[in-house]
Image (tube, rainbow, N blue to C red):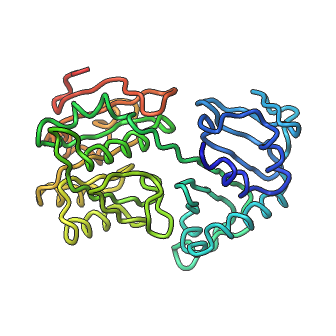
Amino acid sequence: MKDKDGIVRIFSLHIREILERADLEFEKLQEIRLRAMGPLAIRYAGEEFFLKENGKIGREPEGAWMVTGREIQETMEFVGKYSLYAYEDELRQGFLTLRGGHRVGVAGRAVLEGDKVRSIRNISFLNVRLSHQIKGCADKALPFVCKGEEVRHTLIISPPRCGKTTLLRDLIRQISDGKGDRRGHTVGVVDERSEICGCFQGVPSNDVGIRTDVMDACPKAEGMMMMVRSMAPEVLAVDEIGRYEDIHAIETALFCGCRLIATVHGSSLGDIKSKPLFQRLMEEQVFERFLILCPGVPAGRIQEVLDGKGERLC
């Protein structure tokens, strides 16, 4: 990873030393988890490992470095320096976004104001998710999504940690840029958790194409409506749809003529069809392509491609 030093610097001094001792290819490093009085854990090349104080990695937690509450507090102090401008606003959502699109998820004691979370105190759990942009990972999917001037309504179905956001990001970039006889399209991205574009102070850290506009850190339903009204996108892209408000906003966007590319958590098309939330979209065959991802590396590996009727194309 080109930003290896920048990532290591956000951790407490002792955790930083352990990571520097570890013989890791940072391009394969996906997550670093700190739990107070728990073993230092990483997700590496799609598998879970634990780190010892000498930097050695193992599959079992025995002998791993036990993270202290002070190390988590010190890490948050470092993180705050790199994302201070949005510290409070983002923290109440349970995460902070760093330069490069990396995300620090936090958990602890929620402080409520009415029925809404005002802030999080006594933070005892951190999950640093590393952003990896893999240009070209959507090459095989693109011919199924695009045909001539047309972009087909597409739903990417994926279990967690299978690269759906990575695949979506590269689809956005290629659809936006265009190439050869395939013209570029104006793409509107609603990036609720700053994972697709990795915006830092409003500017995307990831390459999402020259014709892409981004509504960052905005709830999907509201963001889709704002994009349709103000930016006139030809293609609308969102990650992890899953609420009734999202479905209503999608229907409105479709009525306005936008082409849609979205992702959802699931293991198969049957899994999605069984969810009442998606029943009407499935009955009306809104989506013309379904991309089903499978676990493992590389990220965004496609298991099968289905048409709008569920017939297998690949």
Image side of residue 77 versus residue 306, left or right = right
Q: In which quarter of the image is residue 310?
A: top left
Q: In which quarter of the image is residue 271?
A: top left
Image side of residue 47 versus residue 157, left or right = right
What residue is drawn where x is 39% and y is 33%? Answer: 137
Which residue appears farthest toward the bottom when viewing the image?
113
Rendered view: 242 above or below 171: below
- Residue 281 lies, in percent from the top left, at 20, 45
Rendered view: 196 above or below 291: below
In the picture, which quadrant includes the C terminus? top left
Rendered view: 176 above or below 124: above
What residue is drawn where x is 52% and y is 55%? Answer: 101
Q: Quadrant of residue 258?
A: bottom left
Q: Nearer the viewer, residue 155 or 166?
A: 166
What residue is drawn where x is 20% and y is 60%? Answer: 233
Looking at the image, how many numbered discs can be counted on the residues?
Answer: 0
- Residue 288 lies, in percent from the top left, at 17, 37
- Residue 206 lies, in percent from the top left, at 45, 52
Image side of residue 96 versus residue 179, left or right = right
Which residue appears farthest toward the front when viewing the image?
180
- Residue 307 lies, in percent from the top left, at 19, 29
What residue is drawn where x is 40% and y is 31%? Answer: 267
In the picture, which quadrant includes the N terminus? top right
